[in-house]
Image (tube, rainbow, N blue to C red):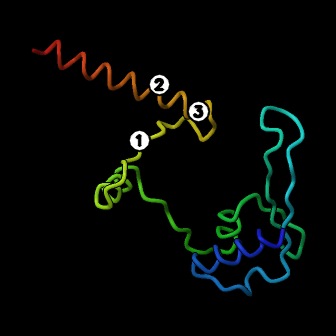
Amino acid sequence: ANKCLQALIQYVEACGGGPDLVKNWKATVEIRKEGSTAGSFDVYYYDPTGRRFRSRTEVARFLRLDIPTQPSVSEQNAIAIASKKKPKTANLGFGRTKKARKRANHAQRFANLTAHMRLSLAD
């Protein structure tokens, strides 16, 4: 929980706030016990009044701070090309689980196949 609070303080500072904004806040780590996500954990942040927040982003919104945005896939690809890393593929809105990644990979392969077929049929 201490590491979570330190991460929250760093995030608040990255959003333009100060560590005093989250003074006297608490964090709890709860491990999921049932379901397909059993074993994974959730971090909850509590302000001094006891109000619960499910993420650092939610805390930053509550504190009315500027939330940093992640670069889009095309921006990430431009960065990857500039640094000679493998470009990222879009997850096509399937989520972040293993099953979702499989679905996204399948959708990407299908899209590549249909594009290839269209090109060959156009000739």
Mark 1 vs mark 3: which is more N-terminal? 1
Quadrant where the N terminus sits is: bottom right
Residue at 37 percent across and 48 percent down: it is 86
Mark 2 vs mark 1: which is more N-terminal? 1
Residue at 81 percent across and 66 percent down: it is 45
Kindly identify which residue carries mark 3. 100
Kindly identify which residue carries mark 1. 89
Q: Amino acid at mark 1?
A: Thr
User: In screen coordinates, is 123 left or right of 82?
Assistant: left
Q: Is residue 55 above or below residue 9?
A: above
Q: Amino acid at mark 2?
A: His
Q: Amino acid at mark 3?
A: Ala
- Give the numbered dot on residue 44: none
Extreme residue toward the front, this view: 84
Q: Position of residue 49 (x, y in %)?
A: 89, 73
Q: CA distance from mark 2 to mark 1?
A: 12 Å
Within 10 Å of disc 2 (Cα), the crowding (few <14, some 14-19, many 20+) is few
Total marks shown come to: 3
Q: CA distance from mark 2 to mark 3?
A: 10 Å
Residue nearer the viewer, 21 or 74: 74
Kindly identify which residue carries mark 2. 106
Residue at 79 percent across and 58 percent down: it is 43
Q: Is residue 85 above or below residue 46?
A: above
User: In screen coordinates, is 19 left or right of 76?
Assistant: right
Q: Is residue 73 above or below residue 28?
A: above
